[in-house]
Image (spheres, rainbow, N blue to C red):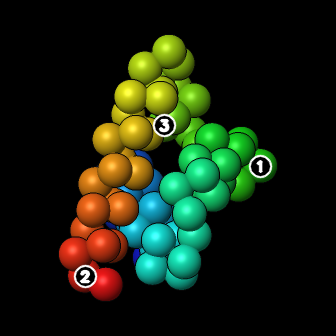
Amino acid sequence: MRTYPSRSEADFAACLAMFAAGFSEADAWAVMTDPAQGISEKYLEKGRHGDAYLSLTIGKARALARSAG
């Protein structure tokens, strides 16, 4: 298992991996917001700002995945 310097980087890497595996944006949102998946901590901590944080993270990962694809 790889470790990351920050949760933001781990979240970005998870989103990027999901897009590389063919997940949709809706799938990424579902995984990243589900506490059972173990990667939603930062999203949940952000409270009402969680959607903005995750929107930016998922958007950046999706853009990079598209440009690399």
The mark found on residue 60 in the picture is none
Nearer-N-terminus badge (2/1)? 1
Mark 3 — residue?
Answer: 42
Q: Nearer the viewer, mark 2 or mark 1?
A: 2
- Amino acid marked by disc 1: Ala
Question: Crowdedness of circle 2 by 10 Å Cα count: few (<14), some, many (20+)?
Answer: few
The residue shown at (60%, 52%) is: 26
Task: Give the CA separation, mark 1 to mark 3.
Answer: 14 Å
Where in the figure is residue 58, as x and y percent of width and height?
A: 40, 51
The residue shown at (47%, 29%) is: 51
Classify 2 as above or below 39: below
Where in the figure is residue 33, as x and y percent of width and height?
A: 63, 41
Mark 1 — residue?
Answer: 36
Can residue 68 be seen from the camera position used here? yes
Mark 2 — residue?
Answer: 68
Q: As drawn, which residue projects farthest toward the top?
A: 48
Nearer-N-terminus badge (2/3)? 3
Is residue 27 left or right of 17 when viewed as pictured?
Answer: right
In the rendered image, the quadrant that contains the C terminus is: bottom left
Secondary structure at numbered mark 3:
helix
Where in the figure is residue 10, as x and y percent of width and height?
A: 41, 59
The residue shown at (36%, 62%) is: 62
Question: Crowdedness of circle 1 by 10 Å Cα count: few (<14), some, many (20+)?
Answer: few
Where in the figure is residue 24, as x and y percent of width and height?
A: 56, 63
Nearer-N-terminus badge (1/3)? 1
Secondary structure at numbered mark 2:
helix
Is residue 25 left or right of 3 when viewed as pictured?
Answer: right
